[in-house]
Image (cartoon, helix red, strand yellow):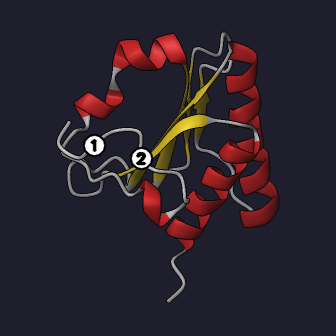
Amino acid sequence: MNDPIRDRVQLAVEAALDKKAFDLDVLSVAKVTSIADYFILCTGNSERQAQTIAGEIVDRLREQARVKPLLVEGMTPGHWILVDFGDFIIHVFTEDCRRFYGLERLWGDAPNVTADFTAVEPRRNEGM
């Protein structure tokens, strides 16, 4: 069965990894919040790389899935960029910002489903 949300999440994950995002996590947040089904968290080495990652995700989803984000925040300065596609939200961080805000801890009850979308192992353990 074709799942358009999972297909779009897959495109976003591939776009992020193509731009060398690291520490990528996909959290299934549908059972712990009503704001989205998935969060994608990833890290760039610099503000510029974070901006490039977010831009590639927006471009790829626009071109291949014909969807636009509902909201993009933080592109400047680029420490924490939030891209909201409604059913899923992408958080692109610099390393220091990701460590400081610790969204993985905040959403610790959400299953990490990164392995469903990529061969990359999840950055965090379940229950962290």
- Name the secondary structure under disc 1: loop
Location of the C terminus (image quadrant): top left
Q: How many marks?
A: 2
Nearer to us in this view, 44 or 38: 44
Q: Is residue 108 left or right of residue 76?
A: left
Q: Residue at x 45, y 60 (%)?
A: 115
Q: Residue at x 51, y 67 (%)?
A: 6
User: For residue 80, which numbered disc appears in the image?
Assistant: none
Q: Is residue 98 left or right of residue 118?
A: left
Q: Is residue 73 left or right of residue 27?
A: right
Q: Residue at x 33, y 51 (%)?
A: 112
Q: On the image, numbered disc 2 is attached to which residue?
A: 122
Please provide percent x and percent y for residue 96. 49, 11
Q: Residues within 10 Å of mark 2 (few under 14, many from 20)?
A: some
Please provide percent x and percent y for residue 97. 47, 13
**Amino acid at circle 2:** Pro
Please provide percent x and percent y for residue 42. 54, 35
Nearer to us in this view, 8 or 98: 98
Q: On the image, numbered disc 1 is attached to which residue?
A: 125
Question: In the rendered structure, are the residues bearing label 2 and label 1 in contact, judged by CB atoms less than 8 Å apart?
Answer: yes
Task: Indicate whether 40 appears above or below 5.
Answer: above
